[in-house]
Image (cartoon, helix red, strand yellow):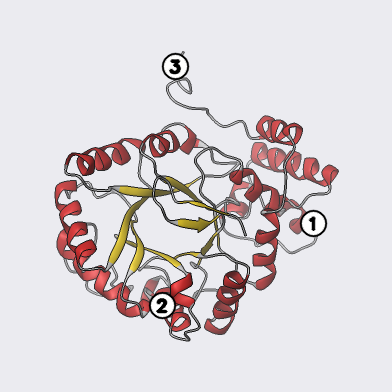
Amino acid sequence: MKYTQLGRTGLKVSRLVLGTMNFGPQTDEPTSHGILDAALSAGLNFVDTANVYGWGENKGRTEEIVGTWFAQGGGRRDKTVLATKVYGNMAGDGATVWPNHDRLSAVNIRRAVDASLKRLQTDYIDIYQFHHIDRHTPFEEIWQAIDVLVQQGKILYAASSNFPGYKIAQANELAKAHGRVGLVSEQCLYNLAERRAEMEVIPAAQEYGLGVIPWSPLHGGLLGGVLKKESEGKRRKDGRSASALERTEVREQVKAYEDLLDKHGLEPGEVALAWLLTRPGVTGPIVGPRTQEQLDSALRALELELSEELLASLDEIFPGSGPSPEAFAW
């Protein structure tokens, strides 16, 4: 396994992040535990989850599955860099939604972290991530709440997810003014087919020393050999990739991608991950395997060396917008 520093911190993390969003909704607890064990055996030490995972009436279920895995002992918790998230309301579908039970107020952060710690069966969270921006809560309040959690030993670092570049700057400028560490990583939507993060988010993260953790590296399956699966009758008939392929230009783009990699004898999903590992500022993409086979495929991506010729060809197929302001101005 290859490791790197998480942004400007001294924390060492694997270059792949094990995402757990499928644990519970699509992958049962024994299989989830098997994937976690296999990942840890391979040296993958970075596990990402969120309090709302499990969804609907089962919000929190994913954290519970990770918690029962930690409870098995064997050094599992000590070897794991654990990241979870706060923002969404934890009320199940149809339940009464009370005010102050979501977003990033000090009262909800306090409530949410204690509930996550209980579900995760641990006494601390390594990286506590804000799942979305909160336009109604000032960062003065947010950082004060985080200070308390750090002092109590409940979290070690704070981080962001789905933040625009200006919010990363705002958060860290205020943190710096008060001698705080600030945000240490940003988890954003970023992949070959969706490169808008290169305009503002990734430059801001690099400027402030945040590690970049891309989510949806296969863009909902679109970059995972979707047309080949379609020809074999294995493609899902709903979801992001299904709707995207209804657009002729997207289908042609994906076909060019798959044809290129077929010529090189490479697997599309593994190349999509390997490409992210070549990008400036990227700590490691989140992989969310539903099966052991999917985990094995993700691990193989770490060994891929993409040639300059292939990287140039990928840029031709998926050019992206480029950095700002050149992306929209001279």
Q: Residue at left 66%, top 32%?
A: 315
SS under mark 3: loop
Residue 317 is drawn in which quadrant?
A: top right
Which mark lies nearer to you, 2 or 1?
2
Q: Amino acid at mark 2?
A: Arg
Mark 3 residue type = Ala
Identify the residue at the far bottom of this view. Answer: 72
Q: List x then y, in percent, for residue 173.
A: 24, 37
Q: Are marks 1 and 3 in contact (CB under 8 Å)?
A: no
Q: CA distance from mark 1 to mark 3?
A: 42 Å
- Vertical arrangement, residue 83 with respect to residue 309, above or below: below
Mark 2 and mark 1 residues within 8 Å of each other at the beta carbon? no
Q: Position of residue 201 (x, y in %)?
A: 41, 38
Query: Camera-side residue: 193 or 288?
Result: 288
Is residue 325 shown left or right of residue 178? right
Residue that carries the numbered disc 3 in the rendered image: 329
Residue 88 in view in this figure:
no
Q: Distance between the Cα atoms at labels 2 and 1?
A: 35 Å
Q: Position of residue 40 (x, y in %)?
A: 57, 71
Q: Badge 2 is on which residue? A: 61
Q: Residues within 10 Å of mark 3 (few under 14, many from 20)?
A: few
Secondary element at image label 1: helix
